[in-house]
Amino acid sequence: MKGRRSRKRAWKEGHRELNMDSLASMPRAQEGPDGRQYRVQRLSSAAKIYTCPACGQSILVGMAHVVAWPIDGPYGLPEGVGARRHWHSQCWGRGLRPL
């Protein structure tokens, strides 16, 4: 049995630039639709049904979406994490304001 050759990039080719937007599990600071700073994390699937605060529609189980929470809550980090909301990726990206 003959080994198969990998179809990955050739050794002589350079590396691709790292696309930070493709790192789903890494939370990043980002300005939200209300102008506040949020910690934003992209998730590849929902574990349960959530309601998007921007459009009021459901985020179904298994649907990719965004979780965002305020970085600087008036009562500190616990209040910020407790204020996290699940958004449709498109709603967050368009900067829609909560209903």
Image (cartoon, grey):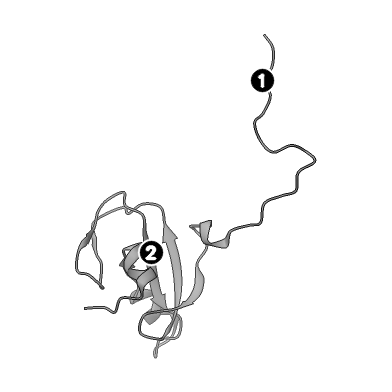
Q: Earlier in the sequence, mark 1 or mark 2?
A: 1
Q: Mark 1 points at which residue?
A: 4
Assign the C terminus to one quadrant of the image. Answer: bottom left
Picture coordinates of residue 51, whole percent (x, y): 22, 65
Residue sitting at the far top: 1
Q: Name the residue under label 2.
A: 66
Residue type (three-letter) at the residue carrying disc 2: Val
* Residue at image point 66% right, 20% down: 4
Element type at mark 2: strand
Q: In the shown orientation, is residue 60 left or right of residue 44?
A: left
Q: In the shown orientation, is residue 94 left or right of residue 72?
A: left
18 and 82: which is toward the camera: 18
* Residue at image point 23% right, 57% down: 49
Picture coordinates of residue 56, whole percent (x, y): 19, 69
* Residue at image point 26% right, 73% down: 54
Assign the N terminus to one quadrant of the image. Answer: top right
Mark 1 surroundings: few (<14), some (14-19) or many (≥20) residues within 10 A = few
